[in-house]
Amino acid sequence: MDWIETLLKKSREKTLTKAEVLHSLFHMIEVNENTLNQIQMDKRDFGPELAEFKKSEIDDINFHIKYYRGLVNFINNISEN
């Protein structure tokens, strides 16, 4: 989480605000959720090999969504001073 502290240091230097960081994370969550929805809604049968790949992609995207949400929670708990 050192990079978050670096981003927040830049925020104090007025080069990047906490709101900008949060906005970026919310954007990444939205992009990942949209991608996840597209993958889950695709009902085509590509065979067992690609079905396993699809499951792996879904798991990876779910991990990233949880990670970004965790970062949002972490950043929200940091004071702006």
Image (cartoon, rainbow, N blue to C red):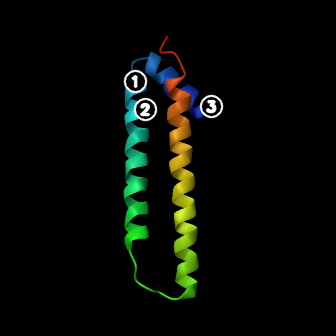
Compared to 8, does 26 lie above or below? below
Q: Is residue 26 left or right of residue 64?
A: left
Query: Given the image, on which type of amino acid does mark 3 rest?
Result: Asp
Q: Is residue 20 left or right of residue 7?
A: left
State which quarter of the image contains the N terminus: top right
Number of residues whose C-alpha sits closer than 10 Å to that of mark 1, classed few (under 14), some (14–19) or many (20 or more): some
- Percent x, y of residue 43: 40, 79
Query: Given the image, on which type of amino acid does mark 1 rest?
Result: Thr
Compared to 11, does 49 lie above or below? below
Find out whether the residues at labels 1 and 2 contact each other: C-beta distance under 8 Å. Answer: yes
User: Which residue is disc 3 drawn over?
Assistant: 2
Q: Is residue 12 visible?
A: yes
User: Which residue is disc 2 drawn over?
Assistant: 21
Q: Reading the chain from its start, which is encountered first: label 3 or label 1?
A: 3
In-front residue for pair 24/51: 51
Write the residue at 39% across / 18% down.
14
Compared to 78, does 59 lie above or below? below
Write the residue at 53% across / 51% down.
64
User: Which residue is disc 1 drawn over?
Assistant: 17
Q: Label 2 vs label 3: CA separation?
A: 14 Å
- Percent x, y of residue 15: 39, 23
Number of residues whose C-alpha sits closer than 10 Å to that of mark 3, classed few (under 14), some (14–19) or many (20 or more): few
Q: Please identify the residue farthest to the bottom as the structure is shown.
A: 47
Q: Please identify the residue farthest to the top as the structure is shown.
A: 81
The quarter of the displayed image where residue 3 is located: top right
Q: Label 1 vs label 2: CA separation?
A: 6 Å
SS for dot 3: helix
Q: Reading the chain from its start, which is encountered first: label 2 or label 3?
A: 3
Mark number displayed over residue 26: none
